[in-house]
Image (spheres, coloured by chain):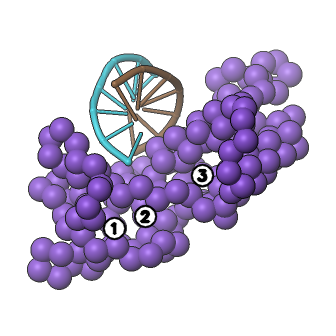
Chain colours: A purple, B brown, C cyan
DNA sequence: ATTAGGG
DNA sequence: CCCTAAT
């Protein structure tokens, strides 16, 4: 499949670029030598090689829902597919972002302690989704047993 | 080109 | 988020 570009939807003015992600606010920034979009917002970390990192954007509950539903339909690990069908209009959300988010959701669901409300809602939603779908398609693609159910997460 | 997992 | 070994 074609490699994902984080700045596909962008409008360049001189050296400045306004990037649109579809579901997020437009961002003003520039492109580095590799044409990677970056902002100049103070506080945004800069990697060792001097290249700024993509600005962090927490997934909205709405996006988390899409992710969970995507996983329940295509299975864990099928991030490229989930990105293509559920995040087609979100240039900044890469398949790797989805993979990382899923990992964080799992960690959060296993963690204890009283997180903030937003976090609780997300965790609850994910746990319910997993509990509801785990018998059907939440399993590792490689570890599927003869029963076809595989190892549930 | 993708995925999985550590950084 | 990034980096990258292994597919």
What is the quadrant of residue A142 in the picture? top right
Please give left or right for residue A141 compared with residue A121 in the image: left
Instruction: Check if mark 1 and mark 3 are on a common chain.
Output: yes
Residue A122, image x and y in percent?
71, 52
Q: Residues within 10 Å of mark 2 (few under 14, many from 20)?
A: many
Q: Nearer the viewer, mark 3 or mark 2?
A: 2
What is the quadrant of residue A40 in the picture? bottom left
Describe the element under mark 2 as helix, strand or loop. Answer: loop
Choose between A135 and A107: the one closer to the eye: A107
Residue at x-position 20% and y-position 67%:
A30
Quadrant (top left/top right/bottom left/bottom right) for the C terminus of chain A: top right
* Residue to which mark 2 is pinned: A91
Q: CA distance from mark 2 to mark 1?
A: 6 Å
Please give left or right for residue A10 compared with residue A106 in the image: left
| Label 2 with label 1: CB-CB less than 8 Å | yes
Instruction: Check if mark 2 and mark 1 are on a common chain.
Output: yes
- The vertical placement of A46 against A41, above or below, is above
Q: Chain of mark 3?
A: A
Can residue A14 be seen by looking at this rendering?
Answer: yes
Give the mark, 1 or 3, whose residue is nearer the N terminus. Answer: 1
Q: CA distance from mark 1 to mark 3?
A: 18 Å
- The vertical placement of A151 against A97, above or below, is above
Residue A34, image x and y in percent?
17, 54
* Residue to which mark 3 is pinned: A82
Give the mark, 3 or 2, whose residue is nearer the N terminus. Answer: 3
Give the mark, 2 or 1, whose residue is nearer the N terminus. Answer: 1
Residue at x-position 34% and y-position 67%:
A8
Residue A112, image x and y in percent?
72, 32
* Residue to which mark 1 is pinned: A8
Q: CA distance from mark 3 to mark 2?
A: 13 Å
């Amino acid at each position: 499949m074609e490699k994902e570009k984080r700045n596909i939807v962008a409008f360049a003015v001189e050296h400045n670029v306004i990037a649109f992600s579809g579901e997020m606010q437009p961002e003003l920034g520039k492109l580095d030598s590799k044409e990677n979009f970056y902002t100049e917002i103070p506080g945004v970390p800069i990697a060792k090689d001097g290249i700024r990192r993509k600005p962090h954007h927490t997934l909205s509950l709405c996006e988390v829902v899409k992710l969970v539903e995507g996983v329940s339909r295509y299975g864990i690990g099928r991030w490229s597919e989930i990105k293509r069908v559920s995040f087609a209009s979100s240039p900044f959300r890469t398949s790797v972002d989805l993979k990382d988010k899923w990992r964080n959701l799992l960690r959060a669901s296993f963690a204890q302690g009283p997180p903030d409300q937003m976090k609780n809602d997300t965790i609850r939603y994910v746990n319910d989704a997993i509990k509801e779908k785990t018998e059907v398609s939440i399993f590792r693609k490689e570890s599927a047993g003869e029963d076809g159910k595989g190892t549930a997460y």
